[in-house]
Image (spheres, grey):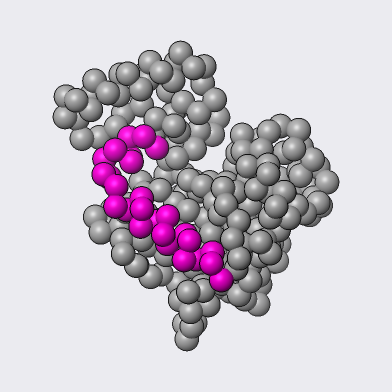
Amino acid sequence: MRAEEIVAGSADEVVVATIDGVRLIVFNRPDARNALSRAMRRRFAALLAEASEDPLVGCVVVTGAHGAFTAGSDIRESRAQPGPMVRPHPGEALRACARPVIAAIDGPCVTGGLEVALSCSFAIASDRSTFADTHAKIGILPAWGQSALLPRAIGVARARQMMMTGAFVDAATALAWGLVNEVTAPEALLPRALDLGRAIAGCDRRSIDWQMRLIADHQGAPLAEALAAEAAAVVRWRAGETHYAPAPGGAMNGHQRTE
């Protein structure tokens, strides 16, 4: 199965499907390399919020059709029609999603598209994928989390290299650097993402939610703090508490710690 099969015959720029408890969200704007217009960003945020509330959805997969993930924000639209930022922006919407989100990247994943991928729970990619942060080349600042998330994903020095040069890295480099978890052939990408999504959807949802939130709340924290937070969560878990709450003084935003 390819993303093109999911969007076939649809004029929608964001196409949705659900397979075995996995909600697929597919960017479908081939004439713009799946750049996200304001309307697409609003739709994307709404779909993620809907997935968070849908008891039949255990995982979300975000991907792009037509050989591209997404070029990020539609810069032409933004420059032709200046206006306030759409909120929640894609990074915020992804980090607030109550379900694990897998980025399945095929083709270019650039600038805002890289911010989308970084805001997902984790990413896999096809071997023809490429990654770049071109904010500096375009002359704008990242606004969806890049400066916070990219150094956490690949290390400060590599993040500086990507952000300051705008140079592309290939899928093999992205895998070696930890930007993606796996690399597949293009035709195997979506089936693999669905397999991972099914595995997640088949697990205990409360356990998944609490574990993801513990990671997010204490990513980068001292080991003693993270271990104490886990111990405190276990006490609340065994007491039958339904909803995870961050430890006092913690900072949690969806599946990524951002400060």
User: x, y (%) of residue 168?
Assistant: 77, 54
Can residue 170 be seen from the camera position used here?
A: yes
Identified at 48% across, 83% down, the residue is 8
Asked whether, in this view, residue 167 is left or right of residue 254, the answer is right
Image quadrant of residue 24? bottom left
Identified at 30% across, 19% down, the residue is 232
Q: Which span of residues is magenta-colored?
A: 187-212
User: x, y (%) of residue 125?
Assistant: 59, 58
What secondary structure do most residues of the magenta stretch adopt? helix
88 and 258: which is toward the camera: 258
**Residue 84 lies within the magenta run:** no
Identified at 74% across, 38% down, the residue is 158
User: x, y (%) of residue 235?
Assistant: 24, 20
Image quadrant of residue 231? top left
Identified at 76% across, 43% down, the residue is 163
User: x, y (%) of residue 137?
Assistant: 81, 52
Can residue 117 be seen from the camera position used here?
A: no
